[in-house]
Image (cartoon, helix red, strand yellow):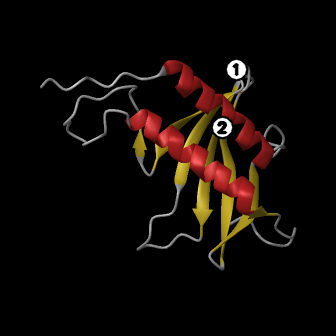
Amino acid sequence: MLKKRYRIDLPAHMAECDANYLRLMKLFPHLRERDVSAFGIELAGRAYQVRLEVLERGPYTSLVQLEQLPRIAWNARPRITVRLYHDARSAEVVECHGARHFRAVYDYPNENMHQPDEKAQVNRFLTEFLSMCLRHGVALPESVPAE
């Protein structure tokens, strides 16, 4: 039996990226004026912080890094870099946990063991992370440092 090759669902991918743009703008409404924003989240009785930092800012795009803190050497925390396209009102993951430049489709197996739908998966992860932040996020007092 021949295995069917994965094909990206472009309309669904674009809808997810567009929705992620709106989620990011809700979490960081002053993105065009400020370089850093932070808020707290509480999960299972533990407090965390999510830090958003603008790495690049242009007239039509911004590059933003999201990171859950504190950093712990033995435990991976979400660290995602997202390109926001302001004219298209869309946001796409460009780096996730050190992996970058995702292709729409990968042959499998491949050298880096990316899944055939790796690009879709990292953008879906961003959706889930941002949705969790919107559900569980709390404003931090002004005196709390951003890192």
Quadrant of the drawing holding the N terminus:
top left
Which residue is pictured at 57% across the width and 45% down the height?
A: 126
Q: Is residue 62 visible?
A: no
Q: Percent x, y for residue 96?
A: 47, 46
Q: Nearer the viewer, residue 69 or 146?
A: 69
Q: Which residue is mark 1?
A: 88
Marked residue nearer the N-terminal end (1 or 2): 2
Query: Is residue 28 shown left or right of residue 6?
Result: right
Q: Percent x, y for residue 134?
A: 73, 53
Q: Which amino acid type is shown beneath numbered disc 2?
A: Asn
Q: Which residue is mark 2?
A: 20
Q: Nearer the viewer, residue 97 or 56?
A: 97
Which residue is pictured at 46% across the width and 22% down the height?
A: 9
| Nearest to viewer (mark 1 / mark 2) | 2
Q: Is residue 142 visible?
A: yes
Circle 2 SS class: helix
Which residue is pictured at 31% across the width and 39% down the height?
A: 115
Q: Is residue 8 above or below residue 30?
A: above
Q: Residues within 10 Å of mark 1 (few under 14, many from 20)?
A: few
Q: Which amino acid type is shown beneath numbered disc 1?
A: Ala
